[in-house]
Structure formats: C-alpha cells, structure tokens
Amino acid sequence: MSEENRELRSKGILPALGVGAAVYFITGVVSLSTLGLVGVGAGVGYGVGSWIADKYQERQDEKLAKEQGASMAQLPWAIQVSLQNWQSFLASRAGGQQLTPPQVEALFQEYARVEPGHAQNVSSFVHSAGLNQGSGSASSSGGPHLVPVVAAEV
C-alpha cells in the first residue's frame, strides 16, 4: 500500500507544479505589463510636463518682451554679438560673485581696452536705452552708433 500512496502523491505533485508555474508566469506577465504601462505613463507625463513648461516659459518671455519693448532677437546683429561678448567677459571676471556698480565700471574700462569695438557698441546701446527710458526730454540721434566688429587677419 505504501507504493500506491507514493504513486498517487507523485501524480498529484506534477499538476500542482504545472498550475503553480502557470500562475507564476501569468502574474509575471501582468507585472511586466504593469511596469511597461507605468514606464509609458511616466514618459508621456514627462513629455507633456516639458511641453507645458516650455509654453509657459514662452508666454513669460513674450510678456517680458512686451514690458521691455524689445527682445534680444530684434536687436541688430552687431549689438547682439557685442552684448554677448561683454556678458562672457563680465562672467569670466566676476567669478560668480555679485559685483558693485564701481566694480562693473572698472571692469568695463578694462573691457574697453581689450575689446574697443564691442565696448563702443555696448556703451552706445546702454546710452540709447537709457535715453529711451528717461523722461523723454532728451532726444536720441537715431539710435546707437554701430561700430563694425571685424576680425584681424593674422
């Protein structure tokens, strides 16, 4: 009798293992598909969030441009290049610290010695912007005087 019981036990284990393996496989597939859906949801959420942030930033930039009257893209090419050059010069000398107006003036004097063409463009732009924002009693002579910036041949 003990052999008959053993045969029955072994016959009962095989279907139990098969059912267990099937359940394990199905739950694994369900878990993987759930992870896949979570990944897709995260990707879509990130994309939509980035799009919303970009649109919000564009609206903020448009609002700021309306308040200031002009955007950087509307400035003449020579002024844009000169302002970018001045900003990079200033950033390299500032070392990440807040500068006082006298320090900025001293750095601009140094900049004028190193880059006279760019310094003239920046100075003209700042002067004309100051006149346009003033009380209106001062008259501008048709905008800033542009100094062409040309690289020297070596």
Image: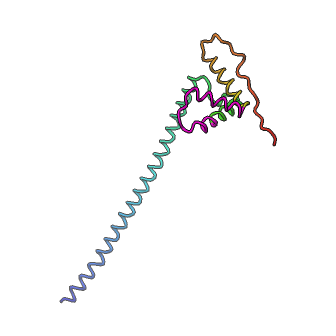
Q: Position of residue 34 (x, y in %)?
A: 39, 56
Q: Is residue 75 above or below residue 94?
A: above
Q: Is residue 91 magenta?
A: yes
Magenta residues span 88-115
Residue 92 in which image quadrant: top right
Q: Main secondary structure of the magenta part?
A: helix
Identify the residue at image location x=75%, y=33%: 149
Question: For this rendering, which residue is in front, 92 or 145?
Answer: 92
Q: Is residue 12 above or below residue 24?
A: below
Identify the residue at image location x=67%, y=32%: 111
Q: Is residue 144 above or below residue 16?
A: above
Question: For this rendering, which residue is in front, 30 or 107?
Answer: 107
| Number of numbered labels in the structure image | 0
Residue 1 in which image quadrant: bottom left
Identify the residue at image location x=65%, y=29%: 108
Identify the residue at image location x=58%, y=36%: 94
Figure coloring: rainbow
Horizontal side of residue 21 vs 114, given as left or right: left
Q: Quadrant of the C terminus?
A: top right
Horizontal side of residue 9 vs 128, given as left or right: left
Residue lying farthest to the left in this orientation = 1
Horizontal side of residue 15 vs 65, given as left or right: left
Residue 4 in which image quadrant: bottom left
Question: For this rendering, which residue is in front, 42 or 150?
Answer: 150
Q: Is residue 113 magenta?
A: yes
Residue lying farthest to the top in this orientation = 137
Q: Position of residue 24 (x, y in %)?
A: 34, 67
Question: For this rendering, which residue is in front, 60 or 102?
Answer: 102
Q: Position of residue 142 (x, y in %)?
A: 72, 18
Residue lying farthest to the right in this orientation = 153
